[in-house]
Amino acid sequence: MLALTGLTGCGGDEDENNVSVVGFSVLESAYDDLFTAFGDTDEGDGISFNGPSYGASGEQSRGVADGQPADLVHFSLEPDMTRLVDAGIVAEDWKDNDSTGICSQSVVVMIVKKDNPKDIQGWQDLVRDDVSIVTPNPASSGSAKWNLLAAYGSVIADNGSDEDAKTYMQEFFQHVAALPDSGRDATTAFTSGTGDVLLSYENEAILARQGGQDFDYVVPDTTLLIENPCAVTEDAENADAAQAFLDFEKSAAGQEVLAADGYRPLESAGASAVTVEGATNPDDPFPAPTTLLTVDGDFGGWAEADDAYFNDGEDGEPVGVIAEIQSQFGTS
């Protein structure tokens, strides 16, 4: 039995088997499919997911820190989980498992108009005079931080210096047409006619195409591995049920469900290859980029990267490299 309702932010007081889920916006469709698949297992029988809450990752994390009920949290990036660790809501050892605390993964891609009329193939194309960019705002969206680190890192991967990367990002922000609050809002802005290219998760591009959106997407030669963290909260009302779902999500069966929705399966799961409708090549849906950057390997981990690139100082003025550049162009 699986119960899904339209309620938002439901706790679990009325149903001892209800799992209260708080996640980032792009996760919603995939989780609907995961809830259904889990409900068909012996472990999922009788467990419900009434009113899961989705939104911009940073805002969701802050909401839980401020008291929003959550048995299970699944965010876009690690700093949003770290906030809850610091608040005593998530255990300090949340990463001590086979997947290092990651439930889903993707890569940064470039969504373009049908047939790619401006022939956008890589990062240097984004700063051409005839190109305008849509990407979410890093002040609220985890997706935005992945996108911007991918852009910055592409310069370093091409043997550029940090100064070269800063210069590129200055050009980049001159071409930004919109900075919506979340990854999902950014997709809506682009499909409504804003911009020539949308930076997004690969899975978001695939999902939109599955839903009938008529655009193409490009996996650039250099891109960034997106790793989305998840955890059961310390004081979860239904910790056992939440853990059972989390275990299913990380299993081969769960990762195959996520793959069908466009997420790249975790290596630790051992998922089988699946055909992915909406992918550029459904039979080879996840092509390997020439250079795949990682936050841990190329940016020193999220604790260092968030501070170095996106931090605001004590007076609220941006001091992180990318945040400071963004503020110069009135796009903060």
Image: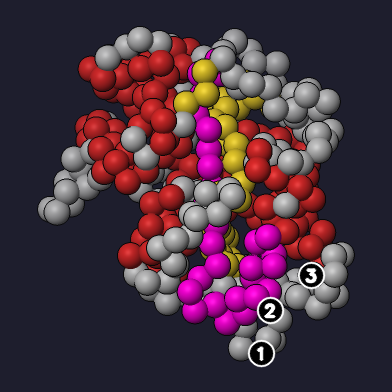
Question: In percent of the image, x 16 and y 48: which residue is there?
Answer: 313
Q: Is residue 222 magenta?
A: yes
Report the Cα–Cα distance between label 2 and label 3: 11 Å
Q: Is residue 104 magenta?
A: no
Helix, strand or loop at mark 3: loop
Mark drawn on residue 14 = 1
Number of labels in the image equals: 3
Q: Is residue 97 left or right of residue 275?
A: left
Residue 124 position in % (x across, y down) = 44, 12
Q: Is residue 118 left or right of residue 114?
A: left
Q: Foreground residue, 220 or 244? A: 244
| Amino acid type of the residue tagged 1 in the rendering | Glu
198 above or below 161?
A: below
The mark closer to the camera, 2 or 3, is 3
Q: Which residue is mark 3?
A: 44
Residue range highlighted in magenta: 220-247
Q: Which residue is mark 2?
A: 18
Q: Foreground residue, 307 or 211? A: 307
The answer to whether marks 1 and 2 mark residues whose Cβ atoms lie closer than 8 Å is yes
| Amino acid type of the residue tagged 2 in the rendering | Asn
Question: In percent of the image, x 37 and y 16: which residue is there?
Answer: 155
